[in-house]
Image: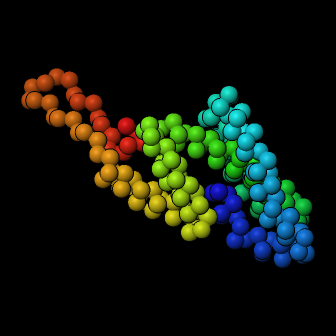
């Protein structure tokens, strides 16, 4: 949602600049969703087999490339193709990041954590780029309050082995 949320406010300006009619604007706004919808299940399945990290990195690279491509676009057709390419990036990032969340969450809390991540994703679209940050801060603060981790006791004076650091964040523990 990162690339789409940043670009969408400017799409009407692009459409006006290139003299797009109603149908062209419709194609422009639907190109991202169409490519994402068709590729989400395919990329999700393939990333389970070939490794998630590569798909996540490729998706982020595609976001960066498509953002630069918007600056170079010179026609409505180019904008539609860039939006479709950005949908491919979303299809690479979204299912893989959700799978990582599933891997990192404690057993029996997968639904809650998936809800937190979706709130951050969709909050970024609705509330701007700072909204996911504030959502994560809010949810992580609440998680710490509801799921405290036992803290390690300090070692007695003169002990030679340092205590292993413990994380207060449930996701990283």
Q: Residue at x 75, y 51 (%)?
A: 36
Residue 46, image quadrant? top right
Q: Residue at x 45, y 44 (%)?
A: 109
Coloration mode = rainbow
Where residue 157 appears, as percent x and y from the top left, is 8, 29
Residue 92, image quadrant? top right
Say how many tags the image has. 0
Above or below residue 130? Residue 88 is above
Where residue 100 appears, as percent x and y from the top left, is 55, 39
Q: Quadrant of the N terminus?
A: bottom right
Above or below residue 123? Residue 173 is above
Q: Residue at x 10, y 29 (%)?
A: 156
In this view, which residue lies farthest toward the top? 160
Q: Residue at x 61, y 64 (%)?
A: 125
Where residue 75 appears, as percent x and y from the top left, is 89, 65
Q: Is residue 79 visible?
A: no
In the image, taking residue 117 as reference, residue 61 lies left or right, namely right
Residue in front for this viewpoint, 79 or 37: 37
Q: Quadrant of the C terminus?
A: top left
Residue in front for this viewpoint, 60 or 26: 26
Q: Is residue 161 visible?
A: yes
In the image, taking residue 86 as reference, residue 103 lies left or right, namely left
Above or below residue 107? Residue 74 is below
Where residue 117 appears, as percent x and y from the top left, is 53, 52
Residue 163, image quadrant? top left
Residue in front for this viewpoint, 69 or 30: 30
């Amino acid at each position: 949602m990162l690339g789409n949320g940043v670009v969408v406010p400017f799409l009407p300006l692009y459409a006006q600049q290139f003299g797009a009619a109603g149908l062209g604007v419709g194609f422009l706004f639907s190109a991202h969703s169409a490519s994402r919808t068709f590729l989400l299940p395919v990329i999700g399945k393939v990333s389970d087999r070939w490794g998630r990290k590569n798909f996540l990195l490729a998706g982020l690279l595609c976001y960066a490339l498509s953002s630069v491509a918007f600056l170079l676009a010179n026609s409505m057709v180019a904008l539609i193709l860039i939006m479709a390419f950005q949908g491919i990036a979303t299809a690479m990032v979204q299912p893989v990041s959700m799978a990582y969340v599933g891997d990192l969450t404690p057993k029996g809390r997968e639904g809650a954590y998936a809800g937190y991540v979706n709130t951050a994703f969709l909050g970024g679209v609705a509330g701007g780029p700072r909204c996911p940050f504030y959502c994560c801060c809010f949810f992580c603060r609440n998680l710490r309050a509801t799921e405290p981790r036992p803290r390690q006791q300090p070692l007695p004076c003169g002990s030679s082995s340092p205590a292993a650091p413990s994380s207060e964040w449930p996701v990283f523990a």
